[in-house]
Image (cartoon, helix red, strand yellow):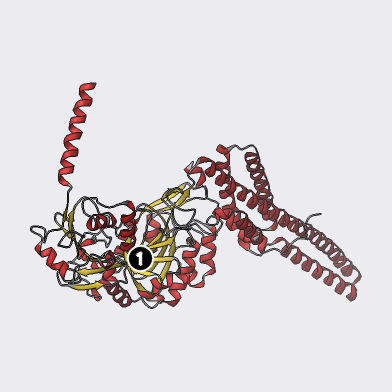
Amino acid sequence: MITRIRRIACLATILLSSAAALSQSLICREPGIQGRDENAARAHRFLLPIDTSEISKAEIYVEKTAKGIYFHSNFVTPGFDNPTKVLTNETSDFERVFVNLIFAGGKSTPYEQKAALKEYREHVQIYLDQSMFTEGGYPTIDVGDATHVAIVDGKTGKLLAGNSVERLDRASPPPILLSKILGCCMYGIPPHLAEQYRQALAQRRLDKSNVRFMSLVRDSGTEGAINKSTSLRSARLGEAGTPIVTLSQIESAFRSANGSTVILVSHVEGTNFVVRDPAQNVTSTIPVDSVRALASKYNVELVDLGCETAQHLRTGTLGVGVTTKFNTVDAVHSLERALSQSQNYADFFQALTSENLRIVVDHGFMQDWPLCADVYAKETGTSVWIKLARIFVSFRQDKKRALGISTSSIEFYQHT
Amino acid sequence: MGETTSIAINEGVFLLQSLSPARLDQLREEYPALSKELAVGISAGPDVEPGDNNAATAILREKAQIMVVALSEAGTAAQQALLTLSRRVKSARRQRLISQMLVLIGSSSSLATLALSKNRAAIISAVLTLLAALWNLLAEYQEKLLNPQAGNIYDAFQRLAEGAYKTRTLSTELTLALKYDQASQIGQLAANANLLCEQLNGWLVQMVTSMPQAPAAA
């Protein structure tokens, strides 16, 4: 027994030491880090030419490299001659890096660190290169509470998104960095593509006369709301009072709606549309992918609004509840409003939003993937936003061709 | 505990919204922690569970209490509808009796007019037969419901009686479970109550709203 424990301990030591060797940070207060001249040159395209030792005037350029994240500042730590540079693959916590960037050799008190972080949040200018975002548009760094964040293209020296970049704190870090696309509450990620999204969405017409409606929700209140809406009731697919619970029913509905736009209201758990009875027993589970495949087969443009309640969170990790109410009945009302006001998808999404209810669109649809938009609401008493629902639009193939969207530019995309 | 706290009360809430919106508003004030659940529809977003079991049990109890209120309102509505229907049944029976009596008198007097060859008697007998037919029509009208799919008043009477019985039974069981703190049963009974409310939403609400209000039982 003891021998076995010793062996495991040895193995763990070897593994941990290997991991330690792989993860490393380099804090440089010399003229430059060896082999990082190009990174430094890109940083100088954005940073102020005059170096500073005032924390409030510090500017930091950040980009991704093969060996980790490269930070280049204009801040000169008192007692040194050159601005600080950091190369690390140990952490993506910007505030932690910032403290190391300002203070040398751990010679700082907790009070000094606190004061420096206050300056970081209020005054320090951050330039994030576009390489700091994943394919899906999520940042690979946690900028914490920084308020001055700009997105840049280090290679061309272009400022892609100025200080219009906003932050959306989620239940777990890092926060999303986003920019407003339209109206009060429609945003895009990554932030620097927001303007392109606005143009692309405005080009996508929504032909109201060709819209059909389908519900996969089993709830009397939702049925009541649909029946009260003249436009949704008349556009409804399937027989009234007969719930759609199987894929074959959906196929039959799509067949009858060939060439139309179908708006689907559903309840989503994981990768499935799930129907539960009032006692919460699952009565139907239909894979989302199968429904989308059927939509494609019958040339149906599918707009699917899925309310999510699958996550189970403890109050310890959140507040006491979501400030903004959003449920299946609200979804029906919002859809009715959006349909009556919209000429194109930009109008449609804008009409779906409201104060404290943000819709976040990512860039997948620009690359021939379905349009994915997440609906977030703010948590009571906190700055955290909770994902309540998501909207997917699977555009028709003929429309994609008409818009000249290239199918050769598909990149890996993961909805997180 | 997570499974029990996440019981749904959406059908109970919709039943309250349809039958007694003022009572639902009152409940929203009484249970602010359940504001999401007390909205009509299925709420989106994560099911937030309290950190400790006592708080979770408290939420479960609150949900069960809301279901008791929903069942009680449904029971009251069913009882009132039963009263109205019972009056209509009585009235229909009375009209049928009158019409049958008129038919009887009319057919007898027809025979008499044939025997006596009196024109005036023939007219009176024809009028009586006409009145009989009219009364019959009235009786049929009383026996029908506004919604033809809901059947006649006798079917409706039976359904209402069953509904009233089920709501009363389930409400009593749930009240007892709450009183004696039988946590294991509360969740199941509340779920059953939500299922029953779905059925009641299907026909009771329609029946009650399409019927003239009966005066409260003495």
Q: Is residue A202 left or right of residue A66?
A: right
Picture coordinates of residue A342, whole percent (x, y): 41, 76
Q: Is A272 located above or below residue B209 in the figure?
A: above
Q: Quadrant of the C terminus of chain B?
A: bottom right
Extreme residue in the front direction? A79
The answer to which of B172 and A172 lies nearer the viewer is A172
Extreme residue in the left direction? A35
The answer to which of A167 and A42 lies nearer the viewer is A42
Figure quadrant of residue A84: bottom left
Identity, as a three-letter code, of the amino acid under mark 1: Val
Q: Is residue A370 visible?
A: yes
Q: Is A74 located above or below residue A21 in the figure?
A: below
Residue occupying image coordinates x 27% and y 74%:
A196
Picture coordinates of residue B78, whole percent (x, y): 69, 54
Picture coordinates of residue A288, whole percent (x, y): 34, 56
Q: Is residue B150 visible?
A: no
Q: Is residue A324 left or right of residue A199?
A: right
Residue occupying image coordinates x 83% and y 72%:
B127
Residue occupying image coordinates x 22% and y 75%:
A404
Find numbered disc 1 in the image and state the secondary structure of the residue it sits on: strand
Q: Which residue is mark 1?
A: A360
Residue occupying image coordinates x 44% and y 77%:
A341
The answer to which of B29 and A226 lies nearer the viewer is B29
